[in-house]
Image (spheres, grey):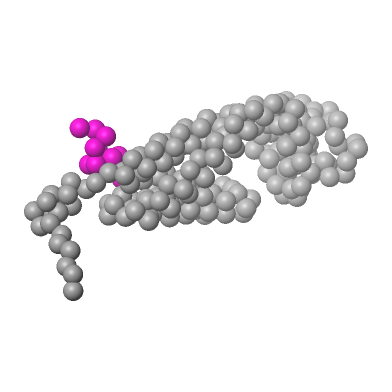
Amino acid sequence: MCGGFTCSKNALIALNVLYIVVASVLISVAVYGRAASLVSNLPIVGGILACGVILILISLLGLVGAVKHHQVMLFFYMVILFLLFLIQFSIACACLGVNMEQQEQLAQQGWGTVDNNIKMEVQQNFICCGFDVKYEPNDPKMGHPSCDSINPKCCPNTDVGCQCEYCMTKLQTTIDYAFKLCGWIGLFFSFTEIVGVVLTRRYRNQTDPDEKMATAIFPRKNFTY
């Protein structure tokens, strides 16, 4: 019957195998993106790698604890998983609650922080020029590299006076989609984590039927000396 010792054990093992697969995908994407120079921002790659490694370590802890029915491992696994649930659930809700104005402010801060090489990369990928007209005159950091090589792509039939749209216009849809996607994915995995906590708590309190049978056949005797 589902809910028994064997069912809880198999469900917990399957959940941790799923986490290991997800962590492997994260690590593979980060390594491939760095090797293929798809991601030029090293902190992003490092963050993805760190998330993958931490998730694998936590999953291995839960997997070994589930296989061996190790009470201490399962306890620490349950506590860590619950803390991850709180953090991930809060971040997911924050991502879903960010409005257009806040997204623009975050994009503005990012544009003012990066160097001209990354700005040029964004302009070439999105075929745009500059961040937004209302920021550039007042803040030198909001400037942009030359758009001479980009403007002809926007108006291939015009030789003079052609200028691409500002990047914020094209980035807004992408940024909103990224926030919503991260939020829903974070919510999904946060609920799988709370399911893991419930399973672990139930599994810790259950008795292994093999051990129970062995105790019944070979009862322990108290010896006094």
Residue sitting farthest toward the front:
225
- Residue at 57%, 54% (x, y): give it: 46
Residue 220 relative to residue 132: left or right: left
Q: What secondary structure prevails in the magenta region?
A: helix
Indicate the quadrant containing the C terminus: top left, top right, bottom left or bottom right. Answer: bottom left
x and y percent of residue 75 in the render? 40, 51
x and y percent of residue 29 in the render? 48, 47
Of residues 162 and 121, the one nearer the viewer is 121
Q: Would residue 179 be seen by someone viewing this image from the given angle?
A: no
Task: State the extent of the magenta-drawn residues as a range.
Answer: 1-14
Of residues 114 and 155, the one nearer the viewer is 114
Residue 7 relative to residue 199: left or right: left
Residue sitting farthest toward the left:
217
User: Measured along the vertical axis of the image, is residue 6 above or below residue 161?
Assistant: below
User: Measured along the vertical axis of the image, is residue 23 above or below residue 155?
Assistant: below
- Residue at 18%, 70% (x, y): give it: 224
Q: Is residue 6 covered in magenta?
A: yes
Residue 196, quarter of picture? top left
x and y percent of residue 66 in the render? 31, 49
Residue sitting farthest toward the bottom:
225
Q: Is residue 29 covered in magenta?
A: no
- Residue at 71%, 26% (x, y): give it: 100
